Image (tube, grey):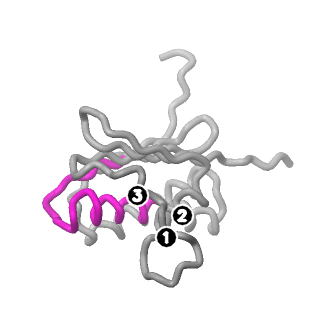
Amino acid sequence: MTGDVHRLRVRFAMPSDPRYLPVVRGTVGSLAAAIGWDECDCRAITLAVDEALTNVIRHAYHNSPDGLIELECRESADGLEITLLDSGEAPDKSNICVRELGCDQPGGLGTHIIRKVMDSVSYEASPEGNRFVARKALIRKTP
């Protein structure tokens, strides 16, 4: 593997059960810190991943703990890439992020948070299942 740069990659296969979210939050926060983000950015990235997982649990699996979510957090050349894969109900893209900010109804802000924190977000249905990919670039400060 000459020329390849080894980068950190963490993979999880977790049940669609919210009990496991603290484990993922701890890992994502630590991974983001190891890559180079400050504490505030680490919390924001962790929140975005938590919201994405919560959306899969709630909407793809309808709160059933029997589903499976595959999560991969991968250090990229310029930052971090998060991929979620599930085999639950596919998201209706027309309903993603439909709630207006400032609306007084509870819930529905997760996708706003994810899009605000991450630089790019995509959802796609594939033969493997529903794939969510979010990327965030790390702006390195020069001394």
- Using the rendered image of the protein, determine whether residue 142 is visible from the camera's viewpoint: yes
Magenta range: 49-71
Q: Amino acid at mark 2?
A: His
Q: Residues within 10 Å of mark 3 (few under 14, many from 20)?
A: few
Give the residue displayed 74% in from the left and 47% down from the top.
140
Any mark on residue 109, and which? 1
Q: CA distance from mark 1 to mark 3?
A: 12 Å
Q: Amino acid at mark 1?
A: Leu
Q: Secondary structure at mark 3?
A: helix
Q: CA distance from mark 3 to mark 2?
A: 13 Å
Q: Secondary structure at mark 1?
A: loop
As for residue 138 lying within the magenta part, the answer is no
Q: Secondary structure at mark 2?
A: helix
Q: Kindly check if marks 1 and 2 are in contact, taking CB atoms under 8 A apart as contact.
A: yes
Give the residue displayed 35% in from the left and 65% down from the top.
54
Q: CA distance from mark 1 to mark 2?
A: 5 Å
Any mark on residue 133, and which? none
Placement of 131 over or under 108, stated as above or below: above
Q: Position of residue 46 (x, y in %)?
A: 49, 63
Q: Nearer the viewer, mark 3 or mark 2?
A: 3
As for residue 51 lying within the magenta part, the answer is yes
> Does label 1 or label 3 sit earlier along the sequence?
3
Placement of 54 over or under 32, stated as above or below: below
Give the residue displayed 40% in from the left and 46% down from the top.
132
| Left or right side of 109 for 44 | right
Among all residues in the image, which is located at the extreme left? Answer: 66
Residue, disc 3: 95
Residue, disc 2: 112
Q: Residues within 10 Å of mark 1 (few under 14, many from 20)?
A: some
Among all residues in the image, which is located at the extreme bottom? Answer: 104
Among all residues in the image, which is located at the extreme top? Answer: 2
